[in-house]
Amino acid sequence: MQKANPEKYTRQRQAAIRAAAAVFAEKGFHGACTKDIAERMGIKQGSLYYYFDSKEEALGEVCLFGIRDYVEHMDGIASSGQSFEAKLTATVTSHLSSYRERNEALKVYNDERLYLPEARRRRLKKLGSRYRQQLENIFDDAKKSGTVRDTIDSRFAAQAVIGMCNAWGDLIVRDPDLDLFKVIQNCTDLLINGFTDTKNTESQRN
Amino acid sequence: MQKANPEKYTRQRQAAIRAAAAVFAEKGFHGACTKDIAERMGIKQGSLYYYFDSKEEALGEVCLFGIRDYVEHMDGIASSGQSFEAKLTATVTSHLSSYRERNEALKVYNDERLYLPEARRRRLKKLGSRYRQQLENIFDDAKKSGTVRDTIDSRFAAQAVIGMCNAWGDLIVRDPDLDLFKVIQNCTDLLINGFTDTKNTESQRN
Amino acid sequence: MQKANPEKYTRQRQAAIRAAAAVFAEKGFHGACTKDIAERMGIKQGSLYYYFDSKEEALGEVCLFGIRDYVEHMDGIASSGQSFEAKLTATVTSHLSSYRERNEALKVYNDERLYLPEARRRRLKKLGSRYRQQLENIFDDAKKSGTVRDTIDSRFAAQAVIGMCNAWGDLIVRDPDLDLFKVIQNCTDLLINGFTDTKNTESQRN
Amino acid sequence: MQKANPEKYTRQRQAAIRAAAAVFAEKGFHGACTKDIAERMGIKQGSLYYYFDSKEEALGEVCLFGIRDYVEHMDGIASSGQSFEAKLTATVTSHLSSYRERNEALKVYNDERLYLPEARRRRLKKLGSRYRQQLENIFDDAKKSGTVRDTIDSRFAAQAVIGMCNAWGDLIVRDPDLDLFKVIQNCTDLLINGFTDTKNTESQRN
DNA sequence: AATGAATGAGAGTTCATTCAT
DNA sequence: TATGAATGAACTCTCATTCAT
């Protein structure tokens, strides 16, 4: 069906995705109802179906919205010539900023994507895997150059970074007063240096 | 005449909690239905209400079951005289083992506890906070003794350990083939030493 | 099935009827549940079925208990040689006292008997009709003797007495502090003399 | 563009109230089921909830519908300058007609209002009390003017009128062939003059 | 004489979805 | 583009009833 007013349609659909993201983030996919989403947009429940074929489709769109940009962002980071530390910082920054900026859609992707139908989930998984893969590559490179210890398993490392970011992402979504900048700094520092004091950092400072 | 089987109720109730844990972990609280839980126990849906007053109460019991023992375990770790490294290892081990042993109840506590009614949530929160507090204390002590760097914020550190464990816990629950021992080792190592080569590289370069 | 202890059985069954009467009176037949009845007796829900085959049977017994004695009482009143006024007073007294004495069973008979299965309802109706019939006879006699006006329809009159008594019976059950004696007096007076002042009462006093 | 049928909701809701009144009157609140109500309206069970939030709310609306107009009617009667007899006749007529006209809602108010939640019940009680109060006032006035005997307690009298009307109301609802006009006449006559022959007999005897 | 445990039917309620307007 | 009205399936929960012990 042709849309009478394509611009308005696009605008409203985006609003619908953001509304759905917020509601799904707060109540979960099954706990949320389409009425909540519609009301948050200022339209009526039935009207939502002008923009989505189903609640499930809405979830799919939210999930995609949640990771698309941030996966693309990772492409940029990976192909940049920066140092390992810079790349890791950029990754953590991009990841955590996403939680603040895009209406909790990333949280929804993490927590609710498993309720998506197979087909859709697979497509999203590809994006997620690409993200993790590129992060792995960064670790592989850093191991070759000696920046990262040999004993680190790249697969594990990538997973760990993602896990840590998501854990803090949750806290960020729940607590709007949390200082994003500080969290980024602390996370990056922890991942790079660990908790314990080593002489080398000492010597590096000299 | 004594009943033939006086603890049957207790036993069945425990079974109900485990069944609920499994179902909630898989489908989420709102996505799960009481029929699934009952069938997993081998009883009929209505019979479930002989053991729970409501689905919500079941969630509460699952959450409590999920963290009670592991909070108590942490009490033991905190009061032991071990080194920081040993304590951290013990914590990570206890935390991650929980995910394997107690039928996903810990995952449910993490993901679904917010659907609990206020009163119950507060009571659980106390336990959760005690856990984090004791972890913070461990970090405070380790900072005093110089094992952990001054620049580490104890609050952040505790949160980070918990977040990392939960992130891996999710993966452990989803993938039963994951080598628990390796994950524990990798996590502990990462948290203590970070990714980058320091002590060793430095000395090798000399 | 033979009862092991017939006396106890009879005693307990009577207790069950009284318990059921109280619960049905308070919550209505459909609003009440067998657990409430059992608990009021101090036994468990399942044990109730030792005394009743079904909830419906319990209702039947309550209804019967509610009117049996009071119908018999009416037999005595009708066959006594008293004056109309005395008979009416006796009827009202018997009717209203019933509400106080027999555990609200009469209220249950009035309000809930229509939920009884046909067969049972018919049997009870016979008793109820006998009651009304005898009241009608009293009016017929009083009309012949001139005590009651010719213009009074006996059928209507009997119905009215019963209706008035039941209306006050409800109030008596709801409010235990209501002075039964006063209500009886007022009702009888109203029924005999009406509200308005007539010269005759005046002249009678002279 | 205006909707073709802007009052459809209001109309349907009123139909729902009438349907609920009929069903509640026949089976009682707890004995009735929402399916019956919906079917009587010609809609499906779930659709009922478009008009009511709950079965309980339906009961509340039915009760209100049952007494609202008739309380207002009483306001008119009380403030009219009619004689006591005329006022009493008007009251009885209004009360008993209500039972025929408004789909048994008044019966529901009498028998089922106690199953309403506290708050709602209190609001209705105010209306009911106003009705009784005004009836009491009528009696007080009539006592002052000597039409009603001194020995009549106004409170009791009002209660008795209401009780008698409700008792006959029940019979009217149950038996559609009952001659409303006759019942009204008989009731009024009984209340005013009582059963016994006084004025007339006396004069006849002279 | 009484009970604990279970059942199954049915209730009230919610909600994604449809569709004429 | 949006809505009001309706639907039907699913879900939670209640409860009379059964029965082995």
Image (cartoon, coloured by chain):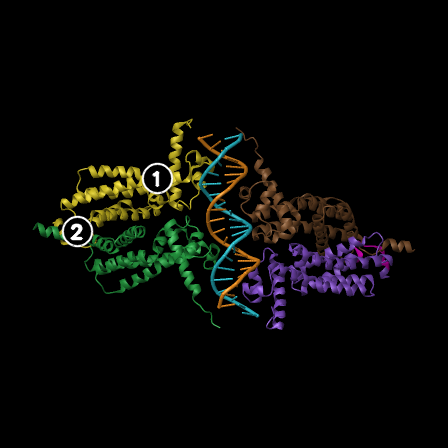
Chain colours: A yellow, B green, C purple, D brown, E cyan, F orange
- Name the residue located 43 percent from the left edge and 65 percent from the top edge: B8
Residue placed farthest to the right in the image? D206
Residue type highlighted by circle 2:
Thr
Secondary element at tag 2: loop
Q: How far across and down, in percent of the image, does residue C185 sit?
A: 75, 61
Nearer mark to the viewer, of 2 and 1: 1
- Magenta part of the chain: C192-203
Foreground pick, B12 / C74: B12
**The residue marked by circle 1 belongs to what chain?**
A
Foreground pick, A122 / D59: A122
Q: Is residue C194 magenta?
A: yes
**Residue A142 found in image quarter:** top left
Mark 2 nearby-residue class (10 Å; few <14, some 14–19, many ≥20):
few
Foreground pick, C1 / A82: C1
Q: Can the viewer see residue A27? A: yes
Q: How far across and down, in percent of the image, does residue A198 sit?
A: 15, 54
Q: How far across and down, in percent of the image, does residue B140 sit?
A: 24, 58
- Name the residue located 64 percent from the left edge and 49 percent from the top edge: D25
Say which residue label 1 marks: A120
Label 2 or label 1, whichever comes before in sequence order? 1
Residue type highlighted by circle 1:
Arg
**Residue A5 found in image quarter:** top left
Say which residue label 2 marks: A151
**The residue marked by circle 2 belongs to what chain?**
A
Q: Can the viewer see residue C104? A: no
Secondary element at tag 1: helix
